[in-house]
Amino acid sequence: MKILFYLMPVFAGVAITIQAGVNSQLRSAIQHPLMAAFISFLVGTLALALLLLFSRNTIPSLSQYSDITWYKYTGGLLGAFVVTVTLIAVAQIGAGNMFVLVVAGQLITAVIMDHFGVLGLQSNPVSLQKFFGICLLVAGAWLVNKK
């Protein structure tokens, strides 16, 4: 069963890549990057609303939401930024070029966050092996983007 926790991120990566292409096509069709991002989030919001409607989990009370620190609500803003950037960039530099840069940014940020235990993550110090892996990834990103 633990293999699912390794497979799900791979499938999420596949979905993100397909999403970028679909959103880029939407942007081309309507000629408006922000409206394309809005439509993408609106459709996702409607899908989540349906899932919530049919979910057996109880919805937290309003008082629980007021006790949450403000920055914990910024995930949607970050998601909107990512979707907007990808649907603009993929049309200009291609999916491969864009995603190797996205993955490089993700890995560098993740290793820093792990090292310092940011946002409640368990501290996991940077090792020489991790540093070498990041260098290889950055070199790979450079090679993929090299003309």
Image: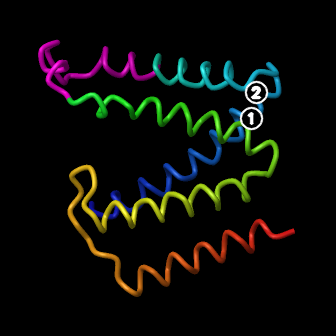
Q: How is the image coloured?
A: rainbow
Q: Residue at x 31, y 64 (%)?
A: 114
Three-letter amino acid code at the position of disc 1: Ser
Q: CA distance from mark 2 to mark 1?
A: 5 Å
Q: Is residue 62 rendered magenta in the image?
A: yes
Q: Looking at the image, which is closer to me, 55 or 120?
A: 120
Q: Is residue 64 rendered magenta in the image?
A: yes
Figure check: 60 above or below 17: above
Which segment is the magenta one? Answer: 47-68
Q: Is residue 146 left or right of residue 86?
A: right
Quadrant in the picture for the N terminus: bottom left
Picture coordinates of residue 103 (x, y %)?
Answer: 56, 60
Quadrant in the picture for the C terminus: bottom right
Figure check: 130 above or below 12: below
Q: Which residue is mark 1?
A: 24
Q: Is residue 8 left or right of residue 99?
A: left
Circle 2 residues within 10 Å: few <14, some 14–19, many ≥20? many
Three-letter amino acid code at the position of disc 2: Arg
Choose top left, top right, bottom left or bottom right for residue 141: bottom right
Q: Are marks 2 and 1 in contact (CB under 8 Å)?
A: yes
Picture coordinates of residue 95 (x, y %)?
Answer: 73, 52
Q: Which residue is mark 2?
A: 27
